[in-house]
């Protein structure tokens, strides 16, 4: 798909992001036989299913608690290992390390010595899903893939949407785990359903399995390539069969996917290098954008194929800004070094000359605040303490109780703050709700001045590629100018890292970043599905 640029910043610009094309063609009839006879009827007055509006500012849901963190959320993390007799246990540990990428559900699929695939999935944290040791014990074998999720396309808390998905088709079983978001999902699904496919979930990942099943290519590698040629958007995928593990990354490289190797020769894939470190796997390289890596379980040979012709790389800059853990290497850069550089650049652009101390918003603001303090010569202190054990709050009977719940999650250190001019550094500002509460907390703790510094540009566009962000109407920087945001938050001064300054940190690599949430320059546009004729029962008149 050719890269395209969205119209610049007006509240209605998102309506001009839509490309009116039909869903990608799907070859041949579906191989699944249905017990109920269905046929596609074309009458003179054809009954058409209305095409749902697929506006970019509503592609993903935004389901944060009223008292919770208002940062965007990463949607998924994937992990896979092949060639180790403890594959499912290693997968469990890897998913634990990737828990920050998804907390609504987790699952593991493993290939046993008998060649059969089994899976265990559940809602909740990884530790909760696999609390019973018997669940891991039911996943023997030396190959496994796993997944943690938030919801992008698909209902948030539905067990049927928890991956890995395990399916059987005429050539055997296949399991898939997916990190990303397909912007042509609805168009593909409409066409598949019109040709007889039956879907069991509301996840965009299931479309990929149907495309593999309907492909006329052989072998499975060709089917995977054939399916991925029809996909648009972000996808880092792991496929597991009885004898192989496939790792796939979309041609633009939106989401990270890395490869490593354990001392015993087992090959490991993960969304972040921190998961490799945990299980003593040595980082080898990224899975390149547009690449399929195939590991054969029988002889542990590793081969590579080009998925599609080269396209301009567009790696998500928010991986560095917020999502990835600071001790990970993502897109070839140490995350903590990137964040420290953001803070230094922010201090150069927007100093706070009357401030006495720099404090981070924990935990993701730590390195940016450290960089700001280093560049400005100010004292660095931990002035806010995050309480990690409060969980999610579902009952908030009054505003007063909600404000108390915020104090439970973030507590000011009065001795650091009282009587001082405080620079508060956060990684991003989305709706502004958390920032305004932090400012009140600091003033109540005796801060003389509160200066907010945001180590990224203003978020003015929703993400289409696998990040849970609000609608554009909920983005505070899309609704207000800088002074309006400052007044709403209640701080004495407010500054963001400029987009130009962010680009300067990356130098010649700046053009390889996806910064659509800051610029509305969307590399791949969503496809508006055409209306398709309804499926009509063969027994209907």
Image (cartoon, helix red, strand yellow):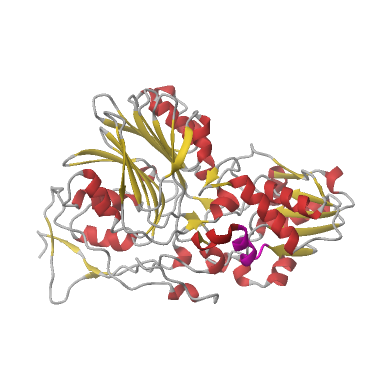
Q: Tell me the quarter of the picture where residue 15 sits.
A: bottom left
Tell me the quadrant of the picture where the C terminus can be found: bottom left
Vertical order, 259 against 61 (above or below): above
**Image check: 290 left or right of 376?**
left
**Image check: 40 left or right of 313?**
left
User: Would you say the magenta stretch is mainly helix, strand or loop?
Assistant: helix
Q: Horizontal and vertical percent for residue 438?
A: 73, 53
Q: Is residue 334 visible?
A: yes
**Image check: 217 left or right of 227?**
left
Q: Is residue 57 magenta?
A: no
Nearer the observer, 520 or 36: 520
Span highlighted in magenta in the image: 497-505
Vertical order, 416 against 509 (above or below): above
Q: Is residue 504 magenta?
A: yes
Q: Horizontal and vertical percent for residue 403?
A: 71, 51
Q: Is residue 396 visible?
A: no
Q: Tell me the quarter of the picture where residue 352 sits.
A: bottom right
């Amino acid at each position: 798909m050719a890269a395209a640029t969205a119209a610049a910043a007006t509240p209605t610009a998102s309506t001009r992001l839509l490309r009116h094309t039909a869903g990608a063609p799907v070859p041949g009839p579906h191989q699944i036989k249905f017990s109920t006879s269905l046929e596609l009827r074309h009458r003179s007055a054809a009954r058409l299913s209305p095409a749902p509006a697929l506006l970019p500012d509503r592609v993903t849901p935004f389901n944060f608690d009223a008292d919770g963190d208002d940062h965007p959320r990463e949607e998924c993390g994937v992990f896979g290992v092949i060639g180790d007799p403890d594959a499912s246990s290693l997968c469990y540990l890897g998913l634990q390390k990737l828990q920050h990428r998804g907390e609504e559900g987790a699952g593991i699929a493993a290939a046993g010595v008998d060649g059969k695939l089994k899976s265990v999935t559940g809602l909740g944290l990884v530790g909760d899903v696999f609390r019973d040791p018997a669940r891991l014990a039911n996943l023997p074998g030396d190959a496994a893939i796993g997944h943690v999720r938030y919801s992008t396309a698909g209902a948030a808390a539905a067990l049927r949407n928890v991956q890995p998905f395990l399916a059987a088709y005429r050539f055997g079983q296949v399991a898939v785990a997916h990190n990303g978001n397909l912007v042509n999902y609805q168009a593909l699904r409409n066409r598949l359903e019109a040709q007889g496919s039956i879907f069991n979930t509301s996840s965009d990942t299931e479309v990929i399995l149907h495309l593999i099943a309907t492909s006329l290519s052989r072998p499975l590698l060709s089917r995977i390539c054939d399916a991925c040629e029809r996909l648009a958007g972000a996808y880092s995928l792991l496929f597991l069969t009885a004898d192989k593990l496939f790792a796939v990354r979309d041609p633009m490289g939106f989401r990270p996917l890395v490869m490593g190797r354990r001392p015993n020769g087992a090959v490991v894939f993960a969304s972040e290098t921190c998961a490799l470190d945990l299980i003593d796997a040595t980082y080898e390289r990224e899975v390149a954008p547009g690449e399929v890596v195939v590991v054969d379980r029988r002889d542990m040979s590793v081969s590579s194929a080009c998925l599609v012709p080269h396209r301009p790389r567009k790696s998500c800059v928010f991986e560095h800004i917020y999502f990835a853990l600071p001790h990970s290497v993502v897109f070839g850069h140490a995350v903590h070094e990137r964040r420290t550089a953001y803070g230094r650049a922010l201090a150069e652009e927007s100093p706070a000359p009357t401030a006495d101390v720099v404090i981070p918003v924990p935990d993701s603001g730590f390195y940016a605040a450290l960089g700001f303090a280093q560049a400005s010569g100010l004292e660095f202190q931990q002035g806010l303490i995050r309480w990690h054990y409060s969980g999610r709050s579902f009952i908030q009977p009054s505003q007063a109780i909600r404000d108390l719940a915020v104090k439970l999650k973030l507590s000011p250190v009065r001795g650091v703050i009282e009587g001082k001019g405080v620079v508060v550094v956060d990684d991003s500002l989305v709706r502004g709700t958390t920032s305004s509460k932090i400012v009140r907390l600091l003033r109540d703790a005796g801060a003389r001045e509160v200066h907010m510094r945001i180590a990224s540009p203003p978020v003015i566009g929703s993400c289409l590629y696998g990040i849970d962000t609000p609608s554009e109407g909920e983005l505070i920087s899309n609704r207000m100018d800088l002074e309006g945001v400052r007044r709403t938050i209640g701080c004495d001064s407010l500054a963001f890292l400029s987009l130009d300054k962010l680009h300067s940190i990356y130098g010649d690599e700046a053009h390889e970043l996806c910064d659509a949430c800051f610029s509305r320059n969307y590399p791949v546009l969503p496809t508006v599905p055409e209306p398709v004729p309804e499926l009509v029962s063969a027994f209907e008149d």
